[in-house]
Image (cartoon, grey):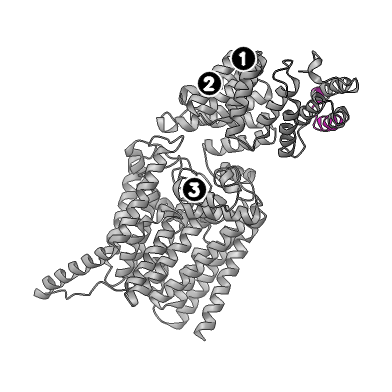
Amino acid sequence: MAIRRLTVSNIKFAGISLAVFGQTVRHDFVNFDDDLYVYNTPAIRAGLTIQGIARAFVSPHAGNWHPLATISHMLDCQLYGLNAGGHHATNVVLHTIATLLLFCVLRQMTGAIWKSVIVAALFAVHPLHVESVAWVSERKDVLSAVFFMLTLIAYVRYVRTPSNARYLTVAIMFTFGLMSKSMLISTPCVLLLLDYWPLNRFKQFPSTGDATISGCDDQTQTIGRLFLEKVPLFVLSAAAGAITFILQKRATGAIPPLPFLWRVENAVASYPIYLWQTLRPTGLAVFYPHPNGSLEIWQVILATGFLLTITTAAMVLRRKQPYLFTGWFWYLVMLVPVIGIVQVGEQGHADRYTYLPLVGLFLLAIWLVADMLGARRPRSQFAVAIAVVIVAVLAWMAFVQTSYWRNSETLWTHTLAVTSDNDVAHNNLGYLCVDREELDKAISHFEAALRIRSGKLDPHYDVGSAFMQMNLANALARKGQSDEAIAHYDEAIALQPYYADAFYNRGSVFFHKGRVDEAMADWEWTLKLQPSDANAHTGLGNALLQKGSPREAIIHYEQALALAPEDPHSRNNIAWVLATSSDDSIRDGAKAIDLAQVAVALSGGREPRFLRTLAAAYAETGRFPEALGVAQQAIAIARMQGKGGLANRLETDLMLYRRRLPLWQNSLGG
């Protein structure tokens, strides 16, 4: 009967998780880190490869070291490609597994089935957990949760029957968890809390007489032994923490920390904020701006007093109600790595940080309510009914919150609706509008972001401000407002003098304005800052070609090709020079055909400029029927894409090919 009850509970957990989060299989990626974690990272998009797996262990990914999470993204790309639904499905499955494992470990530790069911159900559906499940980039959360729960299960087995093999299993599961997300560095502390309750590895001592002194000595020895038992795990935590800290500091575009006092104030205030959001999970957003020292002193004092009061109560009541001690300190300790003392990013707090810490609060609340109600059957039945209602309400709220993650526009529009002065939301909406060619809306969002940003003067924000200035400049450049764009590129470079992308983009605008020397200077700076920038080599090649130096241009095109072999532009550029140069010693029609054919293939045959190059290469080798056919195909595609100017140039090319003349013989051919 007990086994059947457990099986039914597991099915219900899976069902409730799928009911809330199953909708994500129809969701898209979002333009907030998903590019870095998946769709714009070639090593991830390539799927599972020996080289990729090895690189995951020795190189950072998105500024962090979490090789197992990285490999899981590779596996998803191997299985689903860039179909976002498959990536979301993996998150949902992992969250469901973590929920089932949480129920199992609570039942094993406490023997309380219904209490364990309710805690696991709250974990499964609480709206604060939506971000961890519905956001593909937070794969590290749900994956680390699975290994965290497996660590707890392995630890319970070790406590029940100690052995070196079982301790090694604990260490291995913990290591896998750290390799999924380094936030688990506080796990050894959680194990010590579980030693106190519910595993009861701390001895109970007399409260009077000489026995008290002896008892205290025994207790100290017991605590010492339990702590020493965790030393290997603490070493693993320290190593993972050090790796994460170093990588984040060395990451490209790493931002300086906010003033220490601001960080402490925000950390103290964040604990009550998370508590309030746990009780009233409304107005949740993907990004909450940092208060930046705007907290009043009374708010900080009140938050500090609140935390001290609950902490004191948990300590005073720990003998009669030990779950208060374990649950409260579980919550406090697990939030420490992400509470903001060590500031990463610009957020004030984040829903995803509560994913595992909330388990402590759920434990505390459910066992406290059960204690208050006692063992009377009517009261217990009433409590279960109330719990079911609460879980159902939370599940509905989580379902609605999950729906905001269906695409970038919905996510950021909702974020603007529930937060104020959110420059990050405006910036990401602007970025989305640029992709849609809605340039006026994009410019409006970028300008709104920069207006908010103008009030953030701490150097911590300079990197982000420079990025927003460049985004606005890019949108202005695409709209044809080149002078205004250059002014904003100048602002970005003033904020970040070593901003390679800003130099590159400003150089592109200079080039299109005919200011070739200034463009070359910017691209040369780009290469000094970022030597592996293939686009900068391509830009220099274009500039040198325009200045009448085709040999030097080819050198840069070849360097671009070596750096980005999958980029068709460098192949096309080399082929164009080889097919159309007026210098007989440079022209090589056969080689131009080979390069142009690959460029056309890499572009899927949808780029008329590449087809024009291929036609020119055919003409250079005397294959005029092929040149005519490819040029006509290019004209059709160019007109379909609204590229009238290119189509007209291709019509001129056709006239030459019909006369059996290569393109270089026409003074208008370039």
Quadrant of the rendering where the C terminus is positioned: top right
Q: Residue 174 location in percent, x, y?
A: 39, 61
> Label 1 vs label 3: CA separation?
39 Å
- Please rate how many residues cluster around mark 1, counting C-alpha atoms within 10 Å: few if below 14, some from 14 to 19, many from 20: many
Q: Nearer the viewer, residue 425 or 386?
A: 425
Mark 1, residue position:
516
Q: Relative to 515, is 377 above or below?
A: below
Q: Nearer the viewer, residue 542 or 86?
A: 542
Q: Secondary structure at mark 2?
A: helix
> Label 1 vs label 2: CA separation?
12 Å
Q: Considering only order in the chain, which callout, 3 or 1, is on the residue closer to the N terminus?
A: 3
Residue type at mark 1: give it: Val
> Label 2 vs label 3: CA separation?
30 Å
- Please rate how many residues cluster around mark 3, counting C-alpha atoms within 10 Å: few if below 14, some from 14 to 19, many from 20: some
Q: Residue at x 75, y 20 (%)?
A: 580
Residue type at mark 2: give it: Glu
> Residue 55 has which mark?
3
